[in-house]
Image (tube, grey):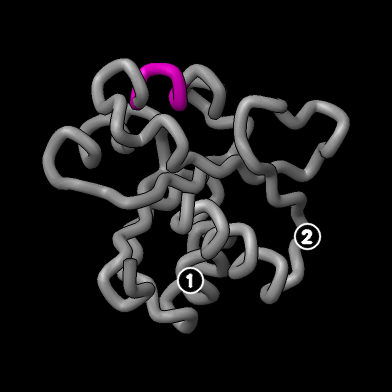
Amino acid sequence: MSTRTARILVVDDEEAVQGVVADVLSEGGYHVQTVGSAAAALEAVGREPWDLVVSDVRLTDRTGPELAREIVRRHPSLANRIIFLTGDAASAPRSAPVICKPFCVDAMLDVVGAQLAV
């Protein structure tokens, strides 16, 4: 899949984090949309197709792993297309790749590229 056509949904309840992640991924050639809640993420994945979801582990309305389970239940094709962001590596879920905040730009792009290649 060409990175120019890959569509990535970023889910984080902190606008500053949304902006940084979106900027990094956009500069990497990806089409990015951001949302600030699990509810908005579920709406977005129901409305249009996504190649990858990058979600914070701790959201205000649901945890990232809970959101991931619901996304996969509704859209099984996204089962291997979810990456978590967290500032607390000890609490990171083991069910998907994790990017720890603060993150290195190259590391984020490497994880995203690897997950899209799966």
**Residue 78 drawn above or below residue 109:** above
Q: Which residues are magenta?
A: 67-71
Q: Nearer the viewer, residue 62 or 67?
A: 67
User: What residue is drawn where x is 63% and y is 67%?
Assistant: 110
Viewer-closest of 114 and 19: 114
**Residue farthest toward the left in the current orientation of the protein:** 47
User: Which residue position holds label 2?
Assistant: 102
The residue lying at 50 percent from left, 17 percent from top is 66
From this view, report whether residue 69 is shown above or below residue 90: above
Q: Quadrant of residue 4?
A: bottom left
The verdict on residue 92 being magenta is no
Question: Mark 1 or 2, which is nearer the eye?
Answer: 1
Residue at left 41%, top 30%?
79
Badge 2, how many Cα within 10 Å: few under 14, some, many 20+? few
Q: Which residue is mark 1?
A: 25
Q: Position of residue 2 (x, y in %)?
A: 33, 73
User: Could you tell me residue 99's position as x and y percent?
Assistant: 70, 51
- State whether the magenta stretch is mostly helix, strand or loop: helix
Answer with left or right where residue 39 lies relative to residue 45: right
Q: Amino acid at mark 2?
A: Pro
Residue drawn at the location 47% of the way across and 83% of the way down:
27
Q: Position of residue 50 (x, y in %)?
A: 27, 49
